[in-house]
Image: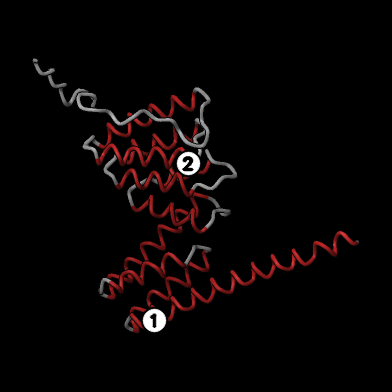
Amino acid sequence: MQHFILRAPGIAALALVALATTVEAQAGSAAAHRRLQQSLDAQTYRAVAAVFEKARERGVPVEPLVNRALQATLHRTPGPQISAAISTLADRLGVAKAALGPGSSDAEISAGADALARGVPRETLVQIRTLSPGRPVTVPLGVLTELVARDVTVGRASQMVVALLRNGATPAQLVSLSDDVKHDIDAGIAAGAALDIRTRGALGTLEQGLGDGRAVLPATPGPGERGGNEPRKAPRKP
């Protein structure tokens, strides 16, 4: 009994923190809705509010919809375009939720919707979820979306993420690979070539069982090592 009494204040404190966090989140959401109502004309606000309500009934996260609408008001987007964009996003969020499963977090659903917006097929979301049982898929989906945004084709980016997940890649390894691909692209290497180089290195590391939370990937290829696209310069004569 004494042990329980000593722990009870800690439990109560945690409960109070959780309650305060929930109240703060609700207050922030209410403030966002007020800002949106003040920024939109009455007709547009009624239209987007109806989308919010329908999304809420379907268990789709509403916060991304509110944020997108607020962003549109900052760019002075016409009301009809805002309504159409919010409706489209709500549909994508619904597809992402269905693909990722009923237990998916709002962050995962939002990441899935972002991937769908880049042309990633629903089946790829299902596959990523299947390969990550009991683990969040926010990072794999985010990496996939970022690669496609950097001009890697949807097919190749999807194959890379799926292959790495099959081989046990961690979120840190996926982020590392994405960062290295970005570095290579910024250095002038074609997106597809950069992805192939980094993926081979990552898979080699995983197959050797050397993963330690970050893949040890090959260094950025130098001149003359970019798939034969650039010849090596002849050495200068003395």
Q: How far from the left and from the top, in percent, is residue 20?
A: 61, 72
- Please tell me the numbered disc located at residue 172: 2
> Disc 2 or disc 1, which is closer to the eye?
2
Amino acid type of disc 2? Ala
**Up-down: is 167 above or below 73?**
above
Q: How far from the left and from the top, in percent, is residue 205?
A: 46, 26
- Residue at x-position 33% and y-position 35%: 156
Q: Residues within 10 Å of mark 1 (few under 14, many from 20)?
A: some
Q: Nearer the viewer, residue 120 or 30?
A: 30
Q: Nearer the viewer, residue 1 or 190?
A: 1
Q: Kindly indicate the quadrant of the structure image that contains residue 69.
A: bottom left
- Residue at x-position 24% and y-position 24%: 225
Q: Residues within 10 Å of mark 2 (few under 14, many from 20)?
A: some
Amino acid type of disc 1? Gln
Label 2 to label 1: alpha-carbon separation: 40 Å
Q: How far from the left and from the top, in percent, is residue 138?
A: 48, 49
Which quarter of the rendering shows the C terminus?
top left
Q: How far from the left and from the top, in percent, is residue 208?
A: 50, 22
Q: Which residue is mark 1?
A: 37
Q: Nearer the viewer, residue 233 or 88?
A: 233
Which quarter of the rendering shows the N terminus?
bottom right
